[in-house]
Structure formats: C-alpha cells, structure tokens
Amino acid sequence: MAAELNTTKFEKFISDYPIYEYRLLDAKALSVAERVRIVCQQECERYGTTWACPPAVGTLKECEDRIHSYDRAVFFSSVAEVSDIMNMEEMLFTRDAHEELTTAVAEYLKGEGFDTFTLSTESCDICKECAYLKGEPCRHPERMHPCLESHGVVVSEIVEREVMEYNLGGNTILWFSMVLFREPK
C-alpha cells in the first residue's frame, strides 16, 4: 500500500514556509540518468570528496533502487535573491536557508510517521573536511542530504514535466529539493 499524505494538513504546514512551488510525485516513476553522473565526475570538484556525492552514494543502479524503494516524493523549490547572480559566494550563501527548509519538510514527514530520504542542493558542506576523505563514516548522517544530481536525478526534466518554474531571471535563484517518503517497513 502506498503511503498516503494528508495533503490538507501538508498544505497548512508549508504555508508557513517560503516554498515557491511543490509537487507530489510517484517515486516509482522517477528516472535517473547516467549523463548527470558523468557531469559530476568530469566537472564537479566535490566528486569523490564527500559522502553526499558519487562514488560514495553508490552506483547509479543503487541510487535508482534507493529512490524506487519509496512510494512518493515531495519535490519543491524556494527562491533566493542576490545582488549579482554571477557572484558564486553570494549565491551559495543563500543555500543554507533552502537546506533548513528541506530539513523542515523532511522532519514534518517523519513526524507524520513516514520513513524519509532527502536529496537536496549541491554537495554537503556541514563539515569543513568530510570524513569520507579519511575513510570514516559521516559525522552527521541525520543532517547530510546527498544532492539530487548525485543520484542521477535530472531536475530540469522534472520541472518541465511538472510545469514548474526553472529560471525566474534577474538576480534570483531557484533551489530544488526532494524528500522521498514511505510507510515504515
């Protein structure tokens, strides 16, 4: 039986948060793409340096199986404004608010009795140096959210299919996250 979310109660919950848009998705219908992982490997400096990124998150097949082990997902965005969209430091500074929002959504779903798995923005940066580099377990597994791309999720495809905004123009940033959920096993 698929997990059922009380959407009226959830709508009331999210009305207190700056969620720009959200969609409830069938997690079993989510696809992953190897090309996203290839971009990670070839272009991201965090590849191989953190528990939130490949190869630490597992093979693409393991990531797909992990996603499909859940029934539903809340896919959502939040908006941040910066003075200069080309200022990477300023842009990344706005990510913390979205990560707090992501944690709040996951905590809400846990409070409703669901098992959850969270995929969020970019790579985890909770610790100055990730324990992965020392071959040690993650120091904050309850707070660390692997990035969507680490699991091969193509955000732009979901956004297009679900008729959501992907780019608001100007000096605005849209951050995306997904919290997968299911009834406890």
Image (cartoon, rainbow, N blue to C red):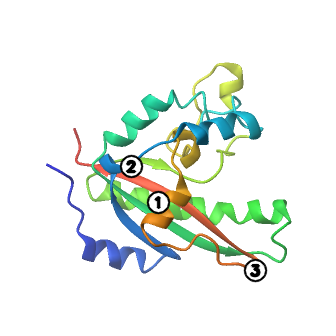
Three-letter amino acid code at the position of disc 1: Ile
Mark 1 Cα-neighbour bin, 10 Å: few <14, some 14–19, many ≥20: some
The residue closer to the viewer here, 48 or 39, is 39
Residue drawn at point x = 49 percent, y = 66 percent:
160
Q: Quick check: can you spot residue 147?
A: no
User: Exactly how many numbered labels are in the figure?
Assistant: 3
Residue drawn at point x = 58 percent, y = 59 percent:
99
Mark 3 Cα-neighbour bin, 10 Å: few <14, some 14–19, many ≥20: few
- Quick one: SS at disc 1? helix
Spot the residue most to the top.
Answer: 135
The residue closer to the viewer here, 4 or 167, is 167
Mark 2 Cα-neighbour bin, 10 Å: few <14, some 14–19, many ≥20: some
Q: Position of residue 133 (x, y in %)?
A: 71, 24
Three-letter amino acid code at the position of disc 2: Leu
Q: Position of residue 180 (x, y in %)?
A: 38, 51
Q: Position of residue 153 (x, y in %)?
A: 51, 47
The residue closer to the viewer here, 124 or 76, is 76
In this rendering, would 110 be left or right of 31? left
In this rendering, would 150 be left or right of 46? left
Q: What residue is shown with label 2? A: 30
Closer to the chain start, of discs 2 and 1, is 2
Q: What residue is shown with label 3? A: 170
Closer to the chain start, of discs 1 and 3, is 1
Residue drawn at point x = 34 percent, y = 54 percent:
110
Q: Which mark is residue 158?
A: 1
